Image (cartoon, rainbow, N blue to C red):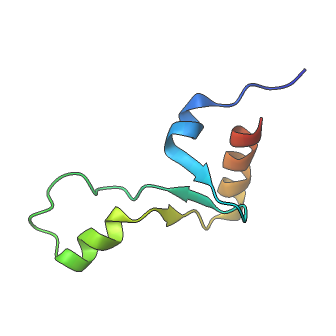
């Protein structure tokens, strides 16, 4: 029987064409006045999950 996709994973992560797992950077929504502009721009871009074990689990959640 096929597993259902974890809905929380589809909301927080997305997979690129090459199979990389991307996520939003934490702390990007509030207290932006105290962060410098380059830090804010860096937080606006999605970041890649670099931990192989964690990426494997997320990939399993997304493809189920």
Residue sitting farthest toward the bottom? 38
Position above or below: 64 against 27: above
* Quadrant containing the N terminus in the rendered view: top right
Relative to 12, 59 lies left or right:
right
* Quadrant containing the C terminus in the rendered view: top right
Residue sitting farthest toward the top? 1
Q: Nearer the viewer, residue 45 or 52?
A: 45
Percent position (x, y) of residue 42?
34, 72
Quadrant of the rendered structure where residue 22 is?
A: bottom right
Q: How many marks?
A: 0
Position above or below: 37 against 6: below
Percent position (x, y) of residue 9?
58, 39
Q: Residue at x 25, y 69 (%)?
A: 40
Quadrant of the rendered structure where residue 8 is?
A: top right
Percent position (x, y) of residue 53?
71, 58
Residue sitting farthest toward the left? 33
Quadrant of the rendered structure where residue 15 is?
A: bottom right
Relative to 8, 16 lies left or right:
right
Relative to 50, 18 lies left or right:
right
Q: Nearer the viewer, residue 52 or 8?
A: 8
Q: Residue at x 69, y 30 (%)?
A: 5
Relative to 8, 24 lies left or right:
left
Position above or below: 11 against 42: above
Residue sitting farthest toward the right? 1
């Amino acid at each position: 029987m096929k597993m259902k996709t974890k809905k929380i994973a589809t909301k927080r992560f997305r997979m690129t064409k090459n199979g990389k797992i991307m996520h939003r950077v934490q702390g990007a929504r509030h207290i932006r006045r105290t962060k410098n502009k380059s830090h804010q721009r860096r937080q606006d871009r999605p970041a890649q999950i670099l931990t192989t074990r964690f990426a494997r689990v997320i990939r399993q959640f997304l493809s189920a």
